[in-house]
Amino acid sequence: MRKSLLLLLFGTGIFCTAPVRNYLEPQNKPAPDTLSQPIDTPSVNLQPLPESSQTIPVQNWPGHRFVLLEKQKMFAQYGYELYPCRELDSCKSAADTSLTGTNHRLRYDKFKGGVLRAKEVENAANEWLVTFVDEKTDLVVYGRTHKGSIKDLALESDLEAAKNRWLGKYVFSRKGVISTVLENQKGFGSIKIRVQDSLKVTDVHWGTTPLPVNPIWLLVETKDGKKGFIPVRYSWTNTLSEQIRGIASWGDDILEKDPSTEYAWPPETWEVINNHRIVIEMTREQVFLSWGEPLARLQKEIQGIQRECWVYGSQELYFDEKGLVTIEEKK
């Protein structure tokens, strides 16, 4: 394995870099192939799916409290997609501009950081109409889900649970970066680190929307004093239905165990992983650490042999019992 990595990385230069993952696409959509069969049991021992990471379906929201997240400055003018009448943006009554904009949406400056308690849920053309009560003003407001989610809301209890799980502890960046806020709040930057670099969580708080989609920010510090944050989800509650996956909701963003103690791999292997590349003969664990959870895991025929196939966008990775044997680019 080590000789193969050295040859491929430093000799021939034949390697494959991580694909750009489009998280607006369905995450478990299998490749359209009549010979493909989904794999029920993952072949990599991923971190177990905690109970807290399960979604609370919208029909079970009544009684739960949601926080109205802060928005990036350029989006604040549009307010929240929540309305004081059941007709939503088709409301016929005159807008109360002390609380809403002329489009009847809740004003950002009046409601940011506020808490809404879900009161009722009803079907609405294959989606859900949710009735909330603002706990500060007692105003009744309504929101309609899109793919089971309402923008700019986060389950209030997730933040306290995240603090209990991670504050003061060490995590590891699955993507090999930590994010930073640029000077004068003018956008975001990033700091490249190694996947096996330990990061101390110094604070946990709500982030801003609309991007990134992960509402909780883990403020972290490296051993050499670099500071930044990693956006995560604590649960799948209020997530677009097509993005909910069978792994921990933070599984694509952080690791909770030191991978360098889990795996005694040589430096050359870690260099490939930290550059998010893959090479032939990598094990499933190495591919997972380098590229993350695939969009789909299948049994698929290639060159007359049924093999395990991991799908990453247009790229298909084929494994035998030892590791990666073939990389195919879908046309």
Image (cartoon, rainbow, N blue to C red):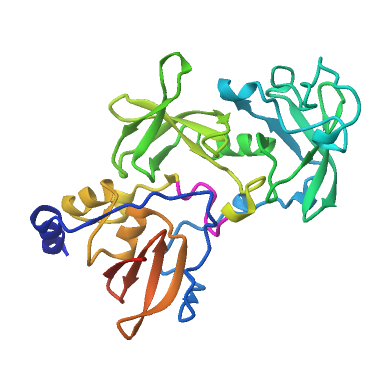
Q: Is residue 195 above or below residue 180?
A: below
User: Where is the N terminus found, in terms of image quarters?
Assistant: bottom left
**In the drawing, does residue 73 fall left or right of residue 39?**
right
- Give me the residue at 71% from left, 29% from top: 80
Location of residue 254 by image quarter: top left
Location of residue 65 by image quarter: top right
The secondary structure that dominates the magenta segment is loop
Task: Residue 32: give x, y in percent of width and height.
Answer: 49, 71
Task: Residue 78: give x, y in percent of width and height.
Answer: 67, 25
**In the drawing, does residue 8 fall left or right of residue 292?**
left
**In the drawing, does residue 133 fall left or right of residue 229?**
right
* Extreme residue in the bottom direction: 304
* Extreme residue in the right direction: 93
Residue 245, magenta (yes or no):
yes
Q: Nearer the viewer, residue 310 or 93?
A: 93
Residue 44 appears in the figure? no
User: Where is the C terminus found, in terms of image quarters?
Assistant: bottom left
Q: Is residue 307 above or below residue 24?
A: below
Residue 320, magenta (yes or no):
no
Instruction: Tell me which segment is drawn in magenta.
Output: 244-252
Residue 259 appears in the figure? yes
Q: Is residue 189 above or below residue 34?
A: above
- Give me the residue at 57% from left, 38% from top: 162
Task: Residue 221: give x, y in percent of width and height.
Answer: 37, 28
Q: How many marks?
A: 0
Task: Residue 160: give x, y in percent of width and height.
Answer: 62, 34
Q: Is residue 107 above or below residue 141?
A: above
* Extreme residue in the left direction: 11
